[in-house]
Each structure stands twice: as structure tokens, then as C-alpha cells.
Image: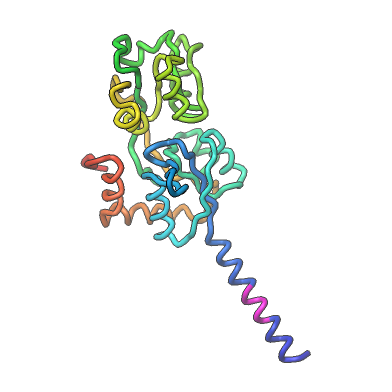
Amino acid sequence: MSTKWLKTVGASLALTVAAGTVSAETLRVVTDPSFVPFEMMDQETGEMIGFDMEIIREVADRAGFEIDLNTMDFNGIIPALQTGNVDIAIAGITITEEREEIVDFSNPYYDSGLRILITQNDDSVEGFSDLEGKKVGSKIGSTSYDYLVKNLEEDDGVTPYPGSSDMYMALMSGAVDAVFYDAPNVGYFARTKGKGKVKTVGPLYEGQQYGIALKSGSEWLDEVNDALASMKEDGTYKTIYEKWFGPMPEGM
């Protein structure tokens, strides 16, 4: 057996190991592109931007992995994690007991709730009970949709939409009387594209916390939690938060 052959095999093995290492450190990350300002497509660059996008990129940098980022409808995210088609998801995902049975969650990184959105001149809705018998838009697979079906006696008018933009278009066109969805997304729309045309009413319903979701048994859970903790300790989280939401409430 020649020395030259041994060197060639050794080099090939080294390249194979190196390639395997790189592959192992690149995690498949998925998000929903329609949940502004958490994640949205920059129309000029084609890049995903938003609060969640800055959070996951910083987490990945600190935890020591790279991300292969893709998008899908929200209702497909948990099943994709469950089947192992993706490794991590970040999309304003509410931590629930049902979801915790099939995926792993990081420690909470955002406190939220649900909010009602109606047209500017509508005075018929002041709280959740006023949604009885009305046409209400929500998002497929979301906790807001589940809350509506569970708590409205007359829920025939509850309509699930694939994306938040679809819900808001339905409200503006009169196809639904109200939208019920995650407070930060609803509030962002009311302050931007819907300014002067829609308004939020009532309190926050069902206090919620968002978490980064990982496939069950993920070896990266501790690293992700450590990264989030260090971001809060050194002020990086606060900087990112205030870029997208304004002054951060005390205790977050």
C-alpha cells in the first residue's frame, strides 16, 4: 500500500468530516412571512426582516449554529417540527400545553395577548362579548382562532384566514366585522397601513408568551436558552425590542 494512497484517503476523510461538521451546524429554520413586525419580507432586498428575524440571527450567532431560513404558512409550522422536516421555528409562536407535548420550546422571549380590531367608525364593539353573532376574522392554526371557537356561543361567523394580511383586507372590505388576533400584530397594522381606517378596542385577552420552537428532543435547547439569557443581560434584547416596538416595559 503506497504512502501516496494513504495520504489521499486521509485527506478525503478529513474533508468528509469537515463537511459533516459544517452540515451539522446549519439548522433548518422556518418562519411565517406575514406576521409583521415580527417577520416580513423586505420588498427591495427580498430578505426576511423583523423582530423575530433579528432575535433568531443573534441567537444563532451566540449558540454557534448557522441558519437555513425558509418560510411557510403558520398552520404548517408545528407539523413540520413534529415530523423533523425543520429544526427550529420562530414566528410569534405562543407557548401552549398542547404544543409542548409535541415540540420543545425555549424560555419565553416575548409577552403578548389577543386584541380586537374593528373599522374606525364602528361603535358596536367594545369588548369580546360584542363579537357574538358577528363575522370575525382570525388566522388558521392560531390560538386566537381557538379562543374564538371556544368562547363564543355563536361562532358560525368565525372565519380563518391563511395570513394576517388576508384578515385585514377582509375587514377593510367589509367581508368581516372584526379581526381577533395577536395584539402586537394588530397594533402594528393599526399604526401603519390601517392608520385612520381601523382601531383596536377592549383589553388584552388570554395573556400569552412567545417561544422559539424546536423539534422534540433537540440538542440545541440549552444553547438557545443561554443565548436568550445573555442577550437580555447585556442589553442586546432591549435594543432589538425598542427598534420594533418602542420603549420596553419594565420587567421584560
Residue 28 x/y as whole percent = 54, 52
Q: Is residue 237 left or right of residue 163?
A: left
Residue 13 within the segment the image draws in magenta: yes
Which residue ends up furthest to the right in the rendered image? Answer: 1
Residue 127 x/y as whole percent = 31, 15
Residue 114 x/y as whole percent = 36, 27
Which residues are drawn in magenta? Answer: 10-15
Query: Which quadrant would the C terminus be assigned to in this image?
Result: top left
How many marks the image carries: the answer is: 0
Query: Which quadrant would the N terminus be assigned to in this image?
Result: bottom right
Residue 127 within the segment the image draws in magenta: no
Q: Taking 216 as reference, is 125 above or below it?
A: above
Residue drawn 60% across the image and 47% down it? 84
Give the main secondary structure of the magenta stretch. Answer: helix
Which residue ends up furthest to the bottom in the rendered image? Answer: 3
Q: Taking 143 as reference, is 202 above or below it?
A: above
Residue drawn 57% across the image and 67% down it? 21
Q: Is residue 117 left or right of residue 145?
A: left
Q: Is residue 190 left or right of residue 30?
A: left
Residue drawn 65% across the image and 80% down it? 11
Residue 191 x/y as whole percent = 29, 30
User: How is this picture coloured?
Assistant: rainbow
49 or 246: nearer the viewer: 49
Corner quadrant of residue 64: bottom left
Q: Is residue 3 left or right of residue 252?
A: right
Q: Taking 41 as reference, is 176 above or below it?
A: above
